[in-house]
Amino acid sequence: MSISSFASGTSTPTVGTPLTLASTTTAGIYILEVDCKNLANTEVVTTTVNSAAKSGGTVNSATTATYTGTGSTPTSHLYTIPIPVGSSGNFVLLQSSGTARAFDWSVWLMT
């Protein structure tokens, strides 16, 4: 098994509005990584990976992960669990509180 970058970038979401970072129709196992180092104390970010259970199926939430900034935490990277995507999926970031922050992110594809 190997891992490669599927998509990456830096995004600043509007607070309270989900932002789709990337979408795929390529089957594989994906991991979303978000660097939360810019979050201030008590600011919250949630990541969601959505996938369809079958070709032509409805894309729904497969997993979510939430991180709350502490202002001094040495571990700031948020990773989702590996998620199989069969036909379609997308990767979403939501900053639910605080000042809008820039987040570096990557979607990794395991093949």
Image (cartoon, rainbow, N blue to C red):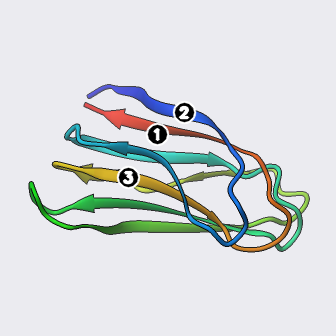
Alpha carbons under labels 1 and 3: distance apart: 10 Å
| Residue 42 drawn at (x, y percent) | 83, 74
> At 26% across and 28% down in the image, what residue appears?
1
Residue, disc 3: 90
Alpha carbons under labels 1 and 2: distance apart: 6 Å
Badge 2 marks a residue whose secondary structure is strand
Instruction: Give the mark nearest the N terminus, 2 or 3.
Output: 2
> At 80% across and 65% down in the image, what residue appears?
69
Badge 3 marks a residue whose secondary structure is strand
| For residue 100, above or below residue 8 | below
| For residue 16, above or below residue 76 | below
Q: Could you tell me if the residues under marks 1 and 3 are in contact, i.e. CB atoms within 8 Å?
A: no
Crowding near the residue tagged with mark 1, few <14, some 14–19, many ≥20 C-alpha atoms within 10 Å: many
Left or right: where does residue 43 sit relative to residue 3? right
Most distant residue in the left direction: 55
| Residue 49 drawn at (x, y percent) | 40, 59
Instruction: Give the mark nearest the N terminus, 1 or 3.
Output: 3
Q: Could you tell me if the residues under marks 1 and 2 are in contact, i.e. CB atoms within 8 Å?
A: yes
Crowding near the residue tagged with mark 2, few <14, some 14–19, many ≥20 C-alpha atoms within 10 Å: some
| For residue 108, above or below residue 81 | above
Instruction: Give the mark nearest the N terminus, 1 or 2.
Output: 2
The mark found on residue 8 in the picture is 2
Disc 1 vs disc 3: which is toward the camera?
Answer: 3
Q: How many circles with numbers are drawn on the protein? A: 3
Alpha carbons under labels 2 and 3: distance apart: 13 Å
Residue, disc 1: 107
Badge 1 marks a residue whose secondary structure is strand
Q: Identity of the amino acid at label 3?
A: Asn
> At 80% across and 53% down in the image, what residue appears?
101
Q: Identity of the amino acid at label 1?
A: Val
